[in-house]
Amino acid sequence: MALIDEIRQAVIDGQAKVVVPKVEQALSEGIAPDKILHEGLISAMSEVGRMFEEGEYFVPEMLIAARAMAAALDLLKPHLVEQGVEPIGKVAIGTVKGDLHDIGKSLVAMMLEGAGFEIMDLGVDVAPEKFVSALNDGAQIVAMSALLTTTMPNMKATIAAIEQAGLRDRTKILIGGAPVTEAYANEIGADGYAPDASSAVRKARALIGAA
């Protein structure tokens, strides 16, 4: 099996301890960082997304694979920068004000990073102004999540703050979280809704025309 295929398989299997030395080996053998990224990591995470959607993988397996990918990406990032590899887009992600749930948001962030996006992870309990600030720092997509029905109105408040800042027409807004629905996304004027991390990647790519 070629080294790139071994890297890809190690990510799919969630083997961080295997994938990191394999990436080091690939770099030392002169394999281009962007080749490792696209054919090893991004390809692996696409397969993980497919397996999740077809019911072969569940959230724990997807999380373990995403962590293996993140470990490999940490090693690869300086080399990608050196090579001048550009991310396909920049996403500011966070759970909205009042909501402290982290796991779903973190999984979406890792899956998006694994798909080639640059991530600005704003964390939990994120005020509307912080999302606006991230847009001023170059984010193209705002990804918001809420796990509580009581914090869902803060999604609407964030969209209003983005509009007031005059940034709405150049911003794509993606929302998700357990109580969130497509109907609610339409009601508050979001650009997209994703029920899970895998569909969030597909939606984000479509929103910036990279699908």
Image (cartoon, rainbow, N blue to C red):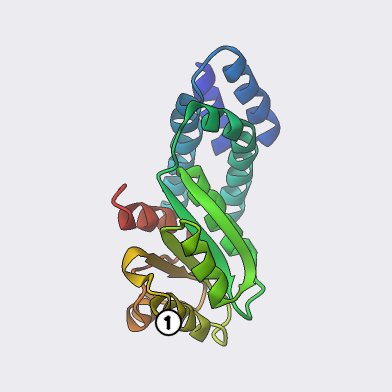
Location of residue 133 with respect to 54 vertically, above or below: below
Callout 1 environment at 10 Å: few (<14), some (14 to 19), or many (20+)? some
* Total residue callouts: 1
Rendered image quadrant of residue 127: bottom right
Farthest right residue?
Answer: 17
Left or right? Give the position of 203 relative to 29: left
Rendered image quadrant of residue 94: bottom right
Rendered image quadrant of residue 35: top left
- Amino acid on which disc 1 is placed: Ala
Q: Nearer the viewer, residue 167 or 65?
A: 167
Left or right? Give the position of 45 relative to 206: right
Task: Give the residue at mark 1.
Answer: 160
Residue 146 visible from this viewpoint: no
Query: Residue 38: where, in percent of width, then height?
Result: 44, 32
Query: Which residue is painted at 62% across and 53% down in the image?
Result: 60
Location of residue 49 with respect to 154 vertically, above or below: above
Q: Nearer the viewer, residue 9 or 96?
A: 96
Query: Which residue is painted at 64% across and 32% down in the image?
Result: 75
Query: Residue 59: where, in percent of width, then height?
Result: 57, 56
Q: Nearer the viewer, residue 107 or 60?
A: 107
Farthest top residue?
Answer: 29
Q: Secondary structure at mark 1?
A: helix
Residue 150 visible from this viewpoint: yes
Query: Residue 28: where, in percent of width, then height?
Result: 61, 14
Query: Residue 8: where, in percent of width, then height?
Result: 52, 30
Query: Which residue is painted at 48% across and 83% down in the image?
Result: 157
Location of residue 176 with respect to 110 vertically, above or below: below
